[in-house]
């Protein structure tokens, strides 16, 4: 096992990783930008090193600064968390060349899964269901129009290196397709340095369901069940739960087996997530693979009792998985609400600033992952998520009740947060019935008369 690990991230995920390391008896090194000098992960780590100015490009994305910090602190491994450099194959390669273990998959796996077009091809070979679409990248507008005619509208234009909702545009006719294609190209180039685009059929009212997998260096692979991440806004997840509502044992087994096939095709090692779209008839299609720890990993931990971060560290150290597939057990239901410093009543305007009141919920079956405390100043430079509330109950209805209680207990001020939106979503009859899709939040934010009638029917 490692003696010292550098955490190449910030915020709540850095705190999460540091806690796991300390429980394993591993010393930790935090890195921080000048804007994060007073962040909780800096206070919790055994050592802390400033790596630059506030902008991410000058700190958390600064590979030379991170490697220098790792060498100064004499660490054996780097945990990238999620976001920033977590899915950067070049960073993983540099870590390897510097004899520092990257706690994640091999660079070639990151590169293969990160190219969405190539990933689709690999899934086709592996027998994993994929959404109908182009076999590779689409080189120009004319080819896009030909493919659209073959596939049929509506379709999606996607940047091959896209993620986080960027480089994704939908089109319902030829005119919209040209605009969507050009926009996806531009966003792909601006955000990921790659303007290549592929297109696929748009699945109407889909559910977004992902499967947690773990693989060690000895060829052992398991899945840890599925999570429903359909409650999202602009492709950004708001609420996640495990297991997915409405899934029977047969469907759960099939989607888990498909995820393992995907992991084998990518020659995968460490923790990862295989993401699927599920249609109204419960057909599922591969969407992408995230080669890192996920924000929503706590719901899987609570249901399975397996600490995913500790497993990641052990696998990177060359140890085998602590459990086999037949030993993975699922107990109850878990749900996570991401709390963002945003004003849902004002176009989700970010709300950085000083947190004067910070009272987090507690009690049985409630977990809070956060880096915030009373007196902390939320910087304007990074993601607006300030914490996650996770509830665990015997079943979905009990979990919803626990979560509503936890949200009611939560006190944050004077900044605005998304807590009121979460309460609104959880109280919707359709949500309580598990009748969710990726467009669900749109009906909550701008309900029409028809939506209200449908809600009354469900209720």
Image (tube, rainbow, N blue to C red):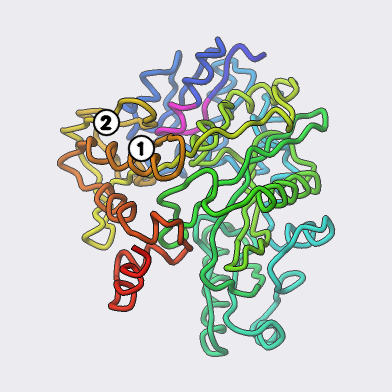
Mark 2 Cα-neighbour bin, 10 Å: few <14, some 14–19, many ≥20: some
Q: Quadrant of the image for the C terminus?
A: bottom left
Mark 1 Cα-neighbour bin, 10 Å: few <14, some 14–19, many ≥20: many
Q: Tell me the CA gap for discs 1 and 2.
A: 10 Å
Residue extent of the magenta highlight: 7-16
Residue toward you, 256 or 349? 256
Q: Position of residue 253 (x, y in %)?
A: 70, 47
The answer to whether mark 1 and mark 2 are in CB contact below 8 A is yes
Q: Position of residue 338 (x, y in %)?
A: 38, 44
Residue toward you, 101 or 284? 284
Nearest to the eye among marks 1 and 2: give it: 2
Is 15 magenta? The answer is yes
* Residue 340 image label: none
Is 287 magenta? The answer is no
* 153 left or right of 137 in image: left
Q: Position of residue 53 (x, y in %)?
A: 38, 37
Q: Position of residue 223 (x, y in %)?
A: 68, 39
Q: Is residue 320 above or below residue 111?
A: above
Going from N to C along the chain, the mark reached first, 1 or 2, is 2
Which residue appears at 49% of the width and 41% of the height? 296
Q: Is residue 352 above or below residue 349?
A: above
Q: Secondary structure at mark 2?
A: loop
Q: Quadrant of the image for the N terminus?
A: top right
Q: Is residue 155 above or below residue 242?
A: below
* 392 left or right of 183 in image: left
The residue singled out by tag 1 in the image is: 387
The residue singled out by tag 2 in the image is: 360
Which residue appears at 23% of the width and 40% of the height? 408
Which residue appears at 31% of the width and 68% of the height? 456
- Dividing the picture into quadrants, the one containing residue 11 is top left
């Amino acid at each position: 096992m490692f003696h010292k690990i550098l955490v190449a991230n910030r915020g709540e995920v850095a705190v999460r990783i540091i806690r796991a390391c300390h429980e394993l008896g591993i010393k930790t090194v935090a890195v921080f930008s000048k804007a994060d000098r007073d962040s909780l992960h800096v206070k919790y780590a055994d050592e802390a090193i400033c790596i630059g100015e506030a902008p991410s490009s000058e700190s958390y994305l600064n590979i030379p600064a991170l490697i220098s910090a790792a060498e100064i602190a004499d660490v054996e491994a780097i945990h990238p968390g999620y976001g920033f450099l977590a899915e950067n194959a070049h960073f993983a390669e540099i870590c390897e060349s510097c004899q520092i273990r990257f706690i994640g998959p091999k660079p070639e796996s990151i590169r293969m899964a990160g190219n969405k077009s190539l990933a689709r091809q690999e899934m086709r070979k592996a027998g994993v269901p994929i959404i109908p679409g182009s076999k590779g990248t689409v080189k120009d507008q004319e080819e896009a129009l030909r493919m659209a005619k073959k596939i049929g509208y509506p379709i999606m234009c996607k940047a091959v290196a896209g993620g986080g909702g960027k480089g994704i545009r939908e089109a319902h006719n030829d005119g919209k397709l040209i605009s969507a294609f050009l926009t996806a190209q531009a966003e792909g180039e601006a955000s990921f340095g790659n303007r290549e685009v592929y297109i696929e059929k748009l699945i109407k009212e889909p559910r977004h369901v992902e499967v947690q997998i773990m693989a060690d260096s000895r060829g052992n692979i398991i899945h840890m069940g599925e999570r429903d991440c359909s409650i999202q806004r602009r492709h950004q997840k708001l609420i996640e739960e495990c297991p997915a509502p409405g899934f029977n044992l047969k469907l759960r087994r099939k989607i888990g087996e498909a995820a393992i096939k995907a992991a084998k095709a990518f020659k995968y090692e460490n923790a990862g997530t295989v993401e699927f779209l599920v249609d109204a008839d419960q057909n599922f299609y591969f969407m992408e693979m995230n080669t890192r720890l996920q924000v929503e990993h706590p719901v899987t931990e609570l249901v399975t009792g397996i600490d995913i971060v500790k497993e990641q560290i052990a696998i990177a150290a060359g140890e085998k998985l602590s459990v086999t597939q037949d030993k993975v057990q699922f107990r109850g239901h878990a749900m996570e609400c991401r709390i963002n410093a945003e004003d849902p009543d004002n176009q989700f305007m970010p709300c950085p600033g000083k947190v004067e009141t910070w009272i987090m919920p507690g009690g049985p079956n409630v977990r809070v992952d956060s880096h915030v405390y009373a007196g902390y100043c939320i910087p304007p430079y990074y993601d607006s998520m300030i914490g996650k509330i996770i509830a665990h109950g015997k079943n979905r209805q009990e979990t919803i009740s626990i979560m509503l209680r936890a949200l009611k207990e939560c006190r944050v001020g004077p900044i605005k947060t998304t807590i009121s939106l979460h309460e609104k979503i959880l109280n919707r009859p359709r949500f309580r019935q598990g009748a969710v899709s990726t467009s669900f939040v749109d009906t909550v934010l701008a309900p029409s008369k028809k939506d209200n009638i449908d809600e009354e029917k469900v209720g």
